[in-house]
Amino acid sequence: MTRLIGRIILVLCVYSFVFGGSTSAAEPIRIAYSSVNPHALLVWLAEKRGLYAKYGLSSTLVYVPGGSVSIQALVSGDIDLAQLTGPPGVIANMKGADVVYIAMTDDKMGYQLVTRQDVKKAADLKGKRLGISRFGSSSDFSTKVLLKKIGVDPKEVTILQIGNETQRLVALKSGGIDGSIFNAPFGAEAKKLDFNILADAGVLNIPYFNTGMCGNAPMMQKNEARMLNFLRAYLEAIKIFKTEPEYTLKALSQFSKVNDQELLKEAYEYNRARIPDIPYPSLVAMQAVVDTLGESNPKAAKADAKKFINDRYLKKLEEEGFLQKLMGR
């Protein structure tokens, strides 16, 4: 883990030199994203459109696969903010960290459980191999939740650490695993590959803190102006995402390195409807994470979900009129 964090620091330095803001007056901010999907695109889009610089920030972005690794970098102070699902932050708090979520762009689980052609129903999963990114990650947590929802005990399958979605898809194609979860929508891709979508969290309507921005609470409190400026850039990126589809599709293609227009449009339309104009962190969604973790962690069962979210920064922007002006209300 120490070596990995060291590599993250090196990447941060290189990325900052190449892509970071050039003005010495700008405040530095280091942001990690743990997946390559339309939600993570928001932090990248803000960089691409110069929004961080617009609000006085010199940004450094880094891809850190797996929420558990992002949390390590966040707690150690190597990054300032991380785009994460709810479980890694809650688990970190259970271990003594003080991290909170200041924004959320999806309050429902958005994963789909995709399997090879011979796994057609839930009963077929017994004894099969399912791939995740890392143990303790969102993909690990969500795989177990989805399995339980369709009546399968997670102990009846073998869960393997494979890597990010691209790596898991390669393993699924080669037969190295029998199934994995992928960010929805995966319908067009599954059809092309003759795979099955065995469970769809969107259809099951599972409350879940699917993705948001997480930070170290003491650091954010000491640097409120920097956090507010980050959110100004983030909110403007959301507006661009929702109101400039042609530009956003091109950006999504560049960000994800996917050129298939059918797949890009499917992903864009699906997430455009789910991402709120104002990404307030949802207590209901966070409570769902806490409740699920509490089934196997007595400490989590006693936790107060309110402790893990902080909406005061967004409220401050709303009070000062920034949100109304941005949204034209």
Image (cartoon, grey):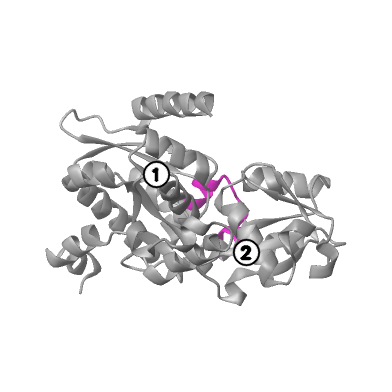
Depth check, front residue: 137 or 23: 137
Task: Decide: few, some or many residues near mark 1? Use Cα within 10 Å; few <14, some 14-19, many ≥20.
Answer: few
Residue at the image position 44 percent from the left and 60 percent from the top = 246
Q: Position of residue 137 (x, y in %)?
A: 56, 48
Question: Quick check: is 256 in the magenta stretch?
Answer: yes
Amino acid on which disc 2 is placed: Val
Q: Circle 2 is placed at which residue position?
A: 145
Place residue 97 in its image quadrant.
top left
Q: Where is residue 192 shown, x and y percent of the image?
A: 76, 60
Find numbered disc 1 in the image and state the secondary structure of the residue it sits on: loop
Q: Quadrant where the N terminus lies? A: top right
Residue mark closest to the camera, 1 vs 2: 1
- Could you give the CA–CA distance between mark 1 and mark 2, rounded to whole angstroms? 25 Å
Q: Earlier in the sequence, mark 1 or mark 2?
A: 1
**Residue placed at 20% from the left, 30% from the top?**
23
Residue type at mark 1? Gly
Asked whether residue 186 is in view, the answer is no
**77 or 277: nearer the eye?**
77
Residues in magenta?
Answer: 251-265
Please tell me the numbered disc located at residue 96: 1
